Amino acid sequence: MNSGDKLNGLSAIKVMIVTVVLIFNVSIVMAEVNWQDNPVGAVFAREGGVCPEGTFRLKSGGYEVYTIVSADKSYQPASLYYGVNDVDKQKVDSMVPDGKVPTSMNCFVVKTDNGYIMFDTGLPSSKGGKTLDRLASLNITPDEIKAVYITHGHFDHIGGLLDDDGKAVYNDAKLYVPLAELTFMRETMKEATALIESAYSGRLVSFETGNLLEDNVLPIAAKGHTPGHTVYRLGNILFVGDLMHGPALQLIDPSICAGYDADRNQAIISRNTILSYSVANSLTVLGAHIPVNGVLF
Ligand SMILES: [Zn+2]
């Protein structure tokens, strides 16, 4: 059975079981890291080791993954969720009484047999992005990155692809962009997309989801946040991009949307499907806006 079959095959009963497992998992994650304190920059690694500020390391399924906090943003206002898809203010406020939803802005680098590969790029340095400084603190140069996988075309994910002069930051990397998202980007952000396509000319790979890519990376469609939003599985790790913006709300109730989700009903479907798939397959889930170290569970 391939991963797509597993995705489609989840029954309603399984989803209910998964919800119980998820709630159980929340308590585990919360026991490890106190979200209320959200100590961005604190040293935390699932498997030992001390990481430089704004970076975290975990080992999973033979891969070494670095979370790089691209911008030190620890909280979102709860109002970001008010009234989105009829979620009422009282419900949100009861879940985060101080009005702050813990968040982050992360990208991820994985050491593979073929070199380093990256998932999203964070903000550019000119907009306060710390990706490059923090890569340097890990002794990784941009030229060592061999592939960059983009979950979707929002600025906090693709902004780090170019420098101030519009030149490619990752000169030796193939750039993987889901075809549906590339089409959406070409339509809605023409100029920025043209710049990226020119800077990465000859190295840009667009693809349909569901087929294994070069680095054993499996792209899985998770549209809703944007039309081509895609999550990536590598071994037992799943990089979920913006599937979720505030787990303190959305891991408890995946039907809660942030105002950033373009198609809210579709975003809810994707959130439920991907979360269920992750639990059913015992995946380690990492997200771009998951607070502190990027680990959802
Ligand atoms: Zn984002």
Image (cartoon, grey):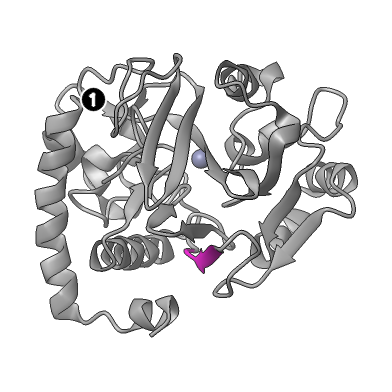
Residue occupying the point 35% across, 60% down: 271
Residue at the spot 28% in from the left edge and 34% down from the top edge: 46
Can you give x and y, in whole percent of width and height, for residue 270 in the image?
A: 39, 65
Q: Nearer the viewer, residue 140 or 197?
A: 140
Please give left or right for residue 150 compared with residue 91 in the image: right
The residue pinned by badge 1 equals: 99
Give the residues drawn in magenta, as a range.
217-222
Density class for disc 1 (Cα within 10 Å; few <14, some 14-19, many ≥20) is some
Residue drawn at 17 percent across, 30 percent down: 32
Residue 91: in magenta span: no
Q: Considering depth in this image, is 208 or 118 the residue closer to the camera?
A: 118
Q: Is 95 left or right of 80, judged from the image as shown?
A: left
Main structural element of the magenta stretch: helix, strand or loop?
strand
Say if the magenta span includes residue 221: yes
- Amino acid type at mark 1: Gly
Placement of 150 over or under 133, stated as above or below: below
